């Protein structure tokens, strides 16, 4: 009698195993299968012709991509390899073995449809009760582009590079002509259509440089040769690299309700867009908005006020004000130390002197739109400490016409209730980027160009939301 179970490599089975047996009940692969089966893929299906060889059904490829992005596997090559060795992928692929080119081409050719599937899956989250409508947190992060920093150049650098490439091409052609002449003498006539491989590479590079040069708007404008849409952005680590600014809005249930990718490194202009996208996707009105100081602007405060939305968005000076650090560490004559008296419409300086209303100044240009009232000192010429306050003839203070909105925002954030509400950002939106970048490793994009990167970021968010729904269902079933 043997104490071990027998080897069964050569065992023949009367009935072949079912695909359902490849993954256990309650496995995420089965949840992804079920979810994708409920999606309308008619738009993708209509892109295919009835002529030629049959291809893989779009739902099979969507299942592989959604499951891959949910579990940290997004490379077409890795997904294709898993279809040969990983039972979850074999189940989703229904034992087909699509190659990596098929997977990659499907992904980049169906970005618009992927955008719609993101919306549909958010609405599934809403149906199962995962989204608490009304309050959202908004945040952004920089994700590296699939491009090397050294290939970002200005117009002058590209022109110099182009001259070098064209010189190298001329040399290659000259060398090729000389080689042809010598070979003709030795071996007779050649076909005459051979092109040196090095010349092909250089010619492609030359054409690419010309294309980038044509897109440059001025001498100071810069473009990356590998990904023309990527721009230099500073990450939290301080590293400056070609990247994209990825924005999300998140509900209290940690569901991504809106996602967007932009090439502006500044977050201020993204707040309104993210609020409106969330409302469009969830088909509900947003009442409360939480965001960090990167989104603080008078335009945003004005929008929230006009739309009757309650904002919790600190400005850059709020922390110092909160800890009363201005008097200790800041210049005594900083604007924040001037007291505004609303009834009299004037400022009182730290020396007790008045700055009266002087004129209005509105500006639509520059980075921010300004609507200002200017106040000018009345006793500066007799002030003993004038040199510490200003080098001009009179000290002036510019007050935004909408500054009252900022003051209301500060009061709200400094209240006991406001502090508790703002703390929610720490366990709603911030962990989402933590999971995507550090748990799943999504610190860079695989695709290139803004359009394709937008689609890839949507896939990351779809995978994240699917995982949240799956975990929610498992928790409910365990009760």
Image (tube, helix red, strand yellow):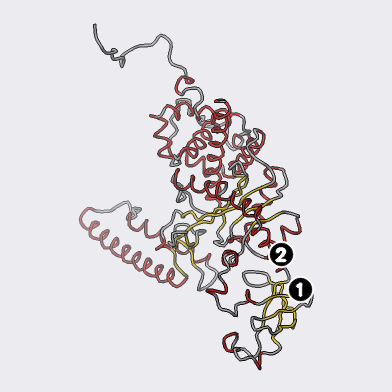
User: In the depicted view, which residue is nearer to us: 286 or 466?
Assistant: 286
Compared with 279, 354 (above or below) is: below
Residue 340 location in percent, x, y?
Answer: 71, 75
How many neighbours does mark 2 have within 10 angstroms: few (below 14), some (14-19), or many (20 or more)? Answer: some
State the SS at label 1. loop
Residue 399 location in percent, x, y?
Answer: 69, 75
Compared with 114, 187 (above or below) is: below
Residue indicated by mark 1: 342
Residue visible at 50% across and 73% down? 219
Looking at the rendering, in which quadrant would you find the N terminus?
A: top left
How many neighbours does mark 1 have within 10 angstroms: few (below 14), some (14-19), or many (20 or more)? Answer: few
| In this rendering, the label closer to the viewer, 1 or 2 | 1
Residue visible at 33% across and 66% down? 168
Residue 30 location in percent, x, y?
Answer: 52, 27
Number of dots carrying numbers: 2
Query: Do we see residue 456 in this rendering?
Result: no
Image quadrant of residue 380? bottom right
Residue 166 location in percent, x, y?
Answer: 38, 67
Residue indicated by mark 2: 405
Image quadrant of residue 100? top left
The reply to whether discs 1 and 2 touch (Cβ–Cβ < 8 Å) is no
Looking at this rendering, what residue extends furthest in the right direction?
Answer: 343
* Mark closest to the chain's N terminus, 1 or 2: 1
User: In the depicted view, which residue is nearer to us: 336 or 352?
Assistant: 352
Q: Is residue 187 left or right of residue 167?
A: left
Q: In this view, does 224 lie to the left or right of 473?
A: left
State the SS at label 2. helix
Residue visible at 60% across and 86% down? 390
Looking at this rendering, what residue extends furthest in the bottom direction?
Answer: 382
User: Spatial distance from mark 1 to mark 2, Cα to Cα?
Assistant: 14 Å
Compared with 72, 452 (above or below) is: below
């Amino acid at each position: 009698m043997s104490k071990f179970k027998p080897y069964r490599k050569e065992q023949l089975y009367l009935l072949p195993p079912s695909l359902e047996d490849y993954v256990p009940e309650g496995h995420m692969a089965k949840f992804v299968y079920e979810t994708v089966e409920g999606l309308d893929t008619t738009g993708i299906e209509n892109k295919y012709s009835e002529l030629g060889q049959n291809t893989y059904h779009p739902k099979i490829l969507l299942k592989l991509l959604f499951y891959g992005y949910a579990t940290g596997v997004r490379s077409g090559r890795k997904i294709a390899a898993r279809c040969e060795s990983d039972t979850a992928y074999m189940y989703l692929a229904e034992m087909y073995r699509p190659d990596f080119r098929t997977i990659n081409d499907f992904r980049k050719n169906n970005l618009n449809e992927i955008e719609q599937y993101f919306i549909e899956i958010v609405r599934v989250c809403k149906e199962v009760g995962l989204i608490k409508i009304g309050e959202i947190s908004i945040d952004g992060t920089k994700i590296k582009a699939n491009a090397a920093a050294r290939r970002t150049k200005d117009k002058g650098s590209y022109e110099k590079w182009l001259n070098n490439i064209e010189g190298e091409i001329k040399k290659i052609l000259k060398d090729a002509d000389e080689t042809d002449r010598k070979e003709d003498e030795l071996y007779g006539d050649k076909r005459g259509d051979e092109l040196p491989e090095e010349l092909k590479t250089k010619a492609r590079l030359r054409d690419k440089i010309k294309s980038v040069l044509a897109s440059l708007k001025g001498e100071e404008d810069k473009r990356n040769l590998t990904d023309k849409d990527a721009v230099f952005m500073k990450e939290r680590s301080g590293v400056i690299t070609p990247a994209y600014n990825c924005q999300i809005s998140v509900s209290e249930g940690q569901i991504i309700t809106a996602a967007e990718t932009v090439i502006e490194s500044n977050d201020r202009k993204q707040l309104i867009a993210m609020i409106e996208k969330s409302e469009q996707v969830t088909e509900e009105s947003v009442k409360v908005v939480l965001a960090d100081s990167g989104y603080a602007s008078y335009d945003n405060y004005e929008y929230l006020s006009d739309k009757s939305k309650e904002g919790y968005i600190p400005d850059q000076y709020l922390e110092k004000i909160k800890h009363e650090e201005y008097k200790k560490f800041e210049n005594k004559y900083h604007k924040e130390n001037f007291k505004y008296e609303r009834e009299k419409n004037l400022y009182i300086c730290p020396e007790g002197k008045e700055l009266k209303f002087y004129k209005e100044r509105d500006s639509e240009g520059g980075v921010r739109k300004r609507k200002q009232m200017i106040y000018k000192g009345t006793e500066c010429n007799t002030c003993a400490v004038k040199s510490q306050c200003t080098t001009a003839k009179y000290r002036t203070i510019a007050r935004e016409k909408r500054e009252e909105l900022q003051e209301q925002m500060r009061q709200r954030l400094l209240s006991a209730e406001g502090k508790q509400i703002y703390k929610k950002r720490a366990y709603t939106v911030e962990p989402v980027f933590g999971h995507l970048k550090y748990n799943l490793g999504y610190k860079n994009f695989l695709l290139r160009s803004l359009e394709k990167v937008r689609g890839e970021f949507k896939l990351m968010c779809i995978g994240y939301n699917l995982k949240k729904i799956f975990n929610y269902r498992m928790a409910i079933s365990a009760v």
